[in-house]
Image: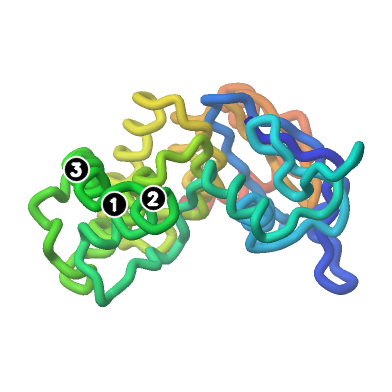
Amino acid sequence: MVRFENVIKRFGDNEVCRELSFTVAPGEFVTLIGPSGSGKTTILRLLMTLERVTSGLIEVGGEPLSHMPRGKGLVPADEKHLRKVRKRIGMVFQQFNLFPNMDVLRNVTEAPVHVLGESRDAAEAHAMALLEMVGLADRAREHPTRLSGGQQQRVAIARALAMRPDVLLLDEVTSALDPELVAGVLALLRKIASTTDITFLCVTHEMGFAREVSDRVMMFDAGRVVEEGTPDVLFTDPGHERTRAFLHAVLDRR
């Protein structure tokens, strides 16, 4: 579903992704771990086309994202192509990024109506089903400022799902929450992962969640994948010294 081929991303002289090559299978839940600045969030931003690759190729669902066909080859994608492929991808950010001037229902329905071209009635019916799933159907007419942080993050998750994505990107989705709200949001994501065929790419420092829900964990350092494997193997018997040091530091802080 997702393929990176020799992807390089530079910001000036700083190379944050170094010839990255990896794949994510349809329906797979892959978690990216590693220290801050190792390139994890940049990968998500490249997939959301918030950043452009310096070189290399990204594909989503067998279709090039970073590039588009022209003649017998590929050229850098234009905005029209990016919009088309980007419809397959949803993202839930660290900050909730809800529209404060719109109620919860409109926050969830705006993109399906204006980007996917759904009718207002169809979009609202789907949105209400999603709000029921995240436990907020009774708050549909509230504005985000009247919701707790955990409730706002649940709305953000419903909004991402409303676009019917093939791929859902999660960027430290509990980092802005009070500790007592984290468990509820993670339980919701666990439920979505187990009951849908969505492909997940998740950046998190919640190692317990990563271990429980992931099919595969990838350890990043300095823009490269230094190790990957199933959670049982990587968390129990990591083979790389950098992984061992990172996990020791993170788990000791817990």
The quarter of the rendered structure image containing the N terminus is top right
Whether residue 35 is visible to the viewer of this picture, yes or no, is: no
Q: In front of the other: label 2 or label 1?
A: 2
Q: Mark 3 falls on what kind of element?
A: helix
Residue 33 image offset from top left, x and y in percent: 62, 45
Neighbor class of circle 3 (other Cα within 10 Å; few <14, some 14-19, many 20+) is some
Q: Amino acid at mark 3?
A: Ala
Q: Earlier in the sequence, mark 2 or mark 1?
A: 2
80 vs 61: above or below: below
Residue ID at (38%, 64%):
96
Q: In front of the other: label 2 or label 3?
A: 2
Q: Amino acid at mark 2?
A: Gly
Whether residue 79 is visible to the viewer of this picture, yes or no, is: yes
Looking at this view, name the residue that lies furthest to the front.
71
Q: Which residue is mark 1?
A: 154
Residue 135 image offset from top left, x and y in percent: 17, 45
Q: Which residue is mark 2?
A: 117
Instruction: Residue 53: name its quadrant.
Output: bottom right
Question: Is 208 left or right of 64, judged from the image as shown?
Answer: left
Residue 200 image offset from top left, x and y in percent: 52, 36
Q: CA distance from mark 3 to mark 1?
A: 17 Å
217 vs 169: above or below: above
Pick the residue in front: 215 or 192.
192
Q: Which residue is mark 3?
A: 125
Residue ID at (85%, 59%):
54
Looking at this view, name the residue that lies furthest to the bottom.
101
Q: Are marks 2 and 3 in contact (CB under 8 Å)?
A: no
Q: Amino acid at mark 1?
A: Arg
Instruction: Residue 103: name its quadrant.
Output: bottom left
Q: Earlier in the sequence, mark 3 or mark 1?
A: 3
Question: Is 5 left or right of 117, judged from the image as shown?
Answer: right
